[in-house]
Amino acid sequence: MRRRPGIAGLQNAAATRDKFRQVGENVAKVRTDVMQEQLATFRSQLEEFARKHKSDIRKNSVFRQQFHEMCAKVGVDPLASNKGVWAELLGIGDFYYELGVQIVDICIATRSHNGGLIDLLELRKLLCQKRKTDLGSLSSDDCLRAISKLKVLGSGFEVISVGKKKLVRSVPTELNKDHNGILELAQAKGYVTVEQVEKEFSWSAGRAIDALETLLKEGLAMIDDGHSDGKRRYWFPCVTLSPDASGSEAKS
Amino acid sequence: MQRTVDFKLPHFFNYPPYFTLQPVRETREKQVQLWKELILDYCRSQKMYIISLEEDFPLFSNPKIERSLSYEAKEVFLAALVSEGRAEWIDKSHKKCLILWLRIQDWANYILDFVKENGLEVTTIEDIRSGIETHGTELAGIDRGVLMRALRLLEQKGKAVIFKGSSADDEGVKFSV
């Protein structure tokens, strides 16, 4: 005959549940302790590592990128806050803030020339001039990181890809697909003509002129009526490197 | 045409669209600014005072990129200098322009310093323009008209007296420094 559930049975069951809970809590606590210990060890190791290689991190762009990758893998963002242990320890936050400020400077200073769109390589070159270092010491990755930090300013700093190039935009211009296409086409010679645009994209003359006029109004393009064939050329300072930069690009 | 000695032309001089007047205001402002600076720097380095719109001027065309400024563009750039007091039209038809890479006031100060340094309290106009002390200074070969205006400004301020010599081209100056 099956025993009917009695008071004792219920109490028993409750006690068992309690036991289990206690054990569970214990296990969890032990685990947390172990985790915390591991984390502390890890943190101190990472700090030690960072301290040891501080100058490498600051100086060597490849090393810097690797360090960032490592931090990303373990879910640490050394740039998250300037007050964070990483920033204090490394001054690495400062590195990017300084870079960010210099990027803003250059973007504003060159804005009247390029309409607020600058080639990333050109930007890097100008940054290196400003910092009096050579191009190798400052990677594109560094610039992109610094620019991503500028986003919190809400000032519309953005990196866009046009063809093979990366362009840094410092004015909130809406560039549509047509404009991007033209910028990409212009990379070949630094300029385009209406005819060329029509032919390349099979657009009507109106569409080509409309897009070019917009780019002109935004200060991204400049007209050139001086060629002997009499065709107006639209030049794009943002995709034309200054003469001393084009040489180094040809080599790389 | 004078040779462009010891003068490094800026990058924009090799960028074709800078030779076409830009229709968009901000772009145009930047363009005008760059040309103004270039014209002043160039004239200073070459010690040139007069630019004639109807004659060839080395700055106004770049054979390397096969571009040259239109008459209108030249006039716009020079007019911008005029409006800033850095140049003056010599004729009514705006065909010749006097470039003041130093303003008359700055010339006057420059002359005063020059006179003090060299102890030339009494000298002649010609000596200021081509005397031994003048060699290697901004004053070498200074435009006579510019020099006279700077001197007259000093005269107004009571810092110099211009006096006639025996002949017309033998004027002298006495500075009170």
Image (cartoon, rainbow, N blue to C red):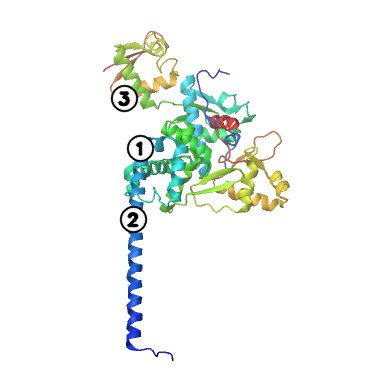
Q: Distance between the residues labelled 1 and 2?
A: 24 Å
Q: What residue type is labelled 2?
A: Gln
The chain to which mark 1 is attached is A
Kindly identify which numbered label has been placed on residue A52: 1
Q: Which amino acid does label 1 sit on?
A: Lys
Kindly identify which numbered label has been placed on residue B156: 3
| SS state under label 1 | helix
**For this view, does B120 lie left or right of residue B61?**
left
- Does residue A108 appear in the picture of this structure? no
Kindly identify which numbered label has been placed on residue B42: none
The chain to which mark 3 is attached is B
Residue B107 placement (x, y as % from top left): 37, 23
* Image quarter hosting the C terminus of chain A: top right
| SS state under label 3 | helix
**Residue lying furthest left in this view?**
B177
- Does residue B128 appear in the picture of this structure? yes
| Vertical comparison of B9 with A156: above or below | above
Query: Which residue is painted at 33% across and 53% down in the image?
Result: A37
* Image quarter hosting the N terminus of chain A: bottom left
